[in-house]
Image (spheres, rainbow, N blue to C red):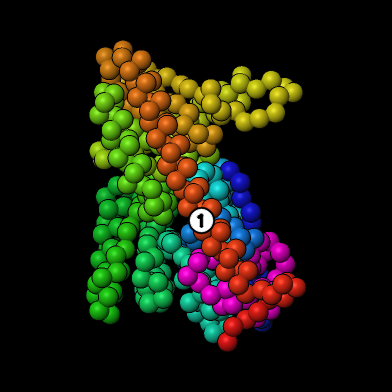
Amino acid sequence: MTSERSYIEVDGENEALPFEYFDDDDDFDTFTDGDGDCGCDEGVLGFSDPFSSEVKPRILLMGLRRSGKSSIQKVVFHKMSPNETLFLESTNKICREDVSNSSFVSFQIWDFPGQIDFFDPTFDYEMIFRGTGALIFVIDSQDDYVEALSRLHLTVTRAYKVNPDINFEVFIHKVDGLSDDHKIEKQRDIHKRANDDLADAGLERIHLSFYLTSIYDHSIFEAFSKVVQKLIPQLPTLENLLNIFISNSGIEKAFLFDVVSKIYIATDSSPVDMQTYELCCDMIDVVIDISCIYGLTGDEAGTPYDKESMAIIHLNNTTVMYLKEVTKFLALVCFLREESFERKGLIDYNFHCFKKAIEEVFDVRLKVQRSRKLLSQRRWSRQTVPNGTQVHPH
């Protein structure tokens, strides 16, 4: 996983937030102070590359202090042990991170400190929400969540007015210390209160998605998977390809996983079972760990996961797990019966066809990115004169 992190202090008087989301419909001047300078160091604020061919959707992590926002980010994207998050200091600055695991999983995460009032006139919240794809609001289920629900309502209503296309996700977090009945009760209560507040404000059209999460199990990875999937425009195509693959191969369930983060970016149309997902995550860990030990020599450079990566695990209930490399970032994990696995040659041939189709989807996206880059360059050239001075139309 490649990532680029930036920090913005919030204790000063003249705070300025970074805005790297740039689309062809946006006015470049709205992101600058009028002279092409974003008023910040390169790579921290503003555009690191105005001709970037990739427009990354933005995911905002919000919530009250100590609700677990930074811990979620560290566990999911930095492989930090959940126990180590106990020693994380409270976030006091806005932290932005670029996540680029593959051509399908590419986005920015902005972690907002709980004590910051981003609706203060100092901050332009309209600019924050304009380029946002998903807003994740984290609620501590083990604490009194009255204040959290009030902040959630304020945040959602403001964001919706600016950008009605935002996906609003609510993580009911730290449920590992609750019984199953208590979890359901908490989720039902929070769901009812949050939607009642929206209904009282005449905003029933706003949809909130709720997830029970904990960093001590795989629930946080599954929740993030569902959030990220909504930001993948190719998701219907990927699901259709998986449906065709399993129906012609005798496979019961298939996942397309991002190997680094263990986020599944697509699965077939059959329901997802939590235990099945956990087995997939464990299988990926086993493959990576064994490859690290036996797959690389001492002086060999490279990654333990490559085009030769493949694994077969026979479970004690006549089920077979089959993992195959799709790209250097993606893996296909399948569940099937032993009698179906006897036709491995057919499965491998169908997988070859599936992999080829995935590569074609990549090619289409790359063409779209190149077209966007060309359009951005043309817009930029129209705003400059031959000596390189930027012209701002009035």
Residue drawn at 29 percent across, 29 percent down = 246
Visible in this render: residue 20?
Answer: no
In the picture, measured across the screen, residue 249 lies left or right of residue 323, that is: left
Asked if the magenta segment contains residue 39, the reply would be yes
Residue at the (27%, 75%) spot, across then down? 203
What range of the chain is rendered magenta?
22-48
Residue that carries the numbered disc 1 in the rendered image: 371
Rendered residue at 57%/69% (across/down): 379
- Against 332, residue 363 (above or below) is below
Observer-nearest of 369 and 127? 369
The quarter of the rendered structure image containing the C terminus is bottom right
Residue 386: percent from left, percent from top: 72, 72
Q: Amino acid at mark 1?
A: Ser
Q: Is residue 66 above or below residue 298?
A: below
Along the viewing direction, whichever of 219 and 392 lies nearer the viewer: 392
Q: Position of residue 340 (x, y in %)?
A: 27, 17
**Residue 305 higher or lower than 137, as above or below:** above
Instruction: Give coordinates of residue 364: x percent, y percent.
Output: 44, 46
